[in-house]
Image: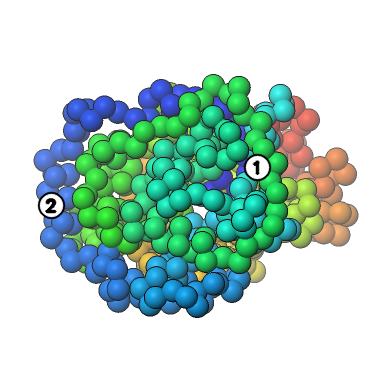
Amino acid sequence: MKSHVARTGWIPYVAVAALGCTQPDTAPMKSSASEALTLESISSVQTEDAEAGGSAFRARSQRGLEISPVPLQTSELTHEEKLRVGLGSYIVNGTADCGGCHSSPAGFLSGGNPFFLDRAGHVVWSRNLTPDATTGMSLTEGQFFEVMRTGKDFHRDQIKMLVVMPWLIFRWMSDEDLKAIYAYLRALPPVHNLVPPDNKSDLPVPGSIPFPNLYNDGEVDRRLPREQGSFSARRGVAIAPRAQPHDLEDDDLRSYGLGSYVANSMMACNECHTNPDRTADSRKINTPAYLSGGTVFGVPPPLQPLMRQVRTTSANLKGATHGFFNEPDDSYARFREIIRTQSHADESPPRPLGFPMNLIAGNLAKVLEHDLKAIYTYVKGVPPVTGPNDQPRQAYARFCSTAADCHAGESCSAATNECVGKACTADVECDTCQTCNASACAAPAADSACVASAR
């Protein structure tokens, strides 16, 4: 869902994105007649979420002030400015999880985490977003907008655009929500933490990618609404990668649009739950596999003993046969309990969620009920995935130090510190990247393509 871990294929992705992600202003629209009717319908729905000072705006702002992990510098701000800071906190600490990359031992959002791009020494570092005068973020609001919308890097003579940072998702946020994030970052307590310079100047990527005047990242191109309010359902409808469902009444359509806005401009669900997340030429989201899972993640070694996980596979959410949201017992109550507890609460005993969803769910657990329900409504409304992309996904590989950490009949692989030996008839019954050999799950080979693909 977020770029917490540098992806092995990031460089070719941004290289192609630079060439093809932006279409000319005169690109033909591909909206169908039924799609146009849906857009017209959502335009008629009152979007109180978008109104600064409206009830939803105030509720999100209040929750944002409650969940900020650090005290804020707001004593000299007006009431309206404090509301905006609170909204920014709601996004940063609830729906977008900025701390997953930008927090470090030095402090909250103080940066300094390395993301290694390849074996040639290319590396980028998460930036210090606090307002420290010498080592923190010094961007003007206008420059911040340019970063978030085009990927331009203003940091210490950098000439290539940001990589790893998921600005290609965040660029679809409204002006109001980007302003709120900026206001929150400026209200943080400064942390002095000098971040090393990136090593990316010779990468085949441009300095930035111009922001288009339409959403052109999915299977239907749509013009963006002029309205720039906060948490806009109308904007959410426009930036949904798949075609719109046609059986939603106004209230559900508005909830679908709001959920799409959160999922596709903040949460970046597609980055984890679609594999690969882009088409072969990287021009668009891989909509035939949208939210069908299959991305492998390697849990950072220091976290493995704590999380009791070695590697994980993202869940199939939308497969017609194997998708979580198409299971017979699917309900909002089940989804809510899983997010609120950060566990597979529908299992007995409940297993913790796999990395990195266990971290992301911890933030989503803080969002308002109204917004969490909207996320569920959106994903539930996405058309199901059929065909070869609809596959069951392996459970996460469980960390062990000895066989006592594993289930009865299993052993602990000394080479990989994972539980092996579970009875099986097929690979899918084994844990992530394991194979079924002689009716027992075996640890992946040293040259495993599955392990090599892990982010």
Q: Is residue 126 visible?
A: yes
Q: Alpha-carbon neighbours of circle 2 within 10 Å: few (<14), some, or many (≥20)?
A: few
Q: Residue 426 has which mark? A: none
**Disc on the earlier residue, 1 or 2:** 2
Q: Is residue 335 left or right of residue 453?
A: left
Mark 1 — residue?
Answer: 125
Image point (69%, 57%), residue name: 192
Q: Alpha-carbon neighbours of circle 1 within 10 Å: few (<14), some, or many (≥20)?
A: many
- Which residue type carries mark 2? Glu
Q: Is residue 365 visible?
A: no
In x, y percent, where is residue 295?
56, 41
Q: Is residue 358 left or right of residue 405?
A: left
In this rendering, the answer to whether 362 lies above or below 29 is below
Label 1 and label 2: CA atoms lie apart by: 43 Å
Image point (82%, 47%), residue name: 417
Q: Which one is in front in this view, the residue at disc 1 or the one at disc 2?
A: 1
Residue sitting nearer the eye, 222 or 418: 222
In x, y percent, where is residue 182?
46, 57
| Residue contact at pointers 1 and 2, CB within 8 angstroms | no
Label 1 residue SS: strand
Q: Is residue 200 left or right of residue 94?
A: right
Q: How many marks?
A: 2
- Which residue type carries mark 1? Trp
In x, y percent, where is residue 409?
81, 54
Mark 2 — residue?
Answer: 40
Label 2 residue SS: helix
In this rendering, the answer to whether 132 lies above or below 156 is below
In this rendering, the answer to whether 177 lies above or below 202 is below
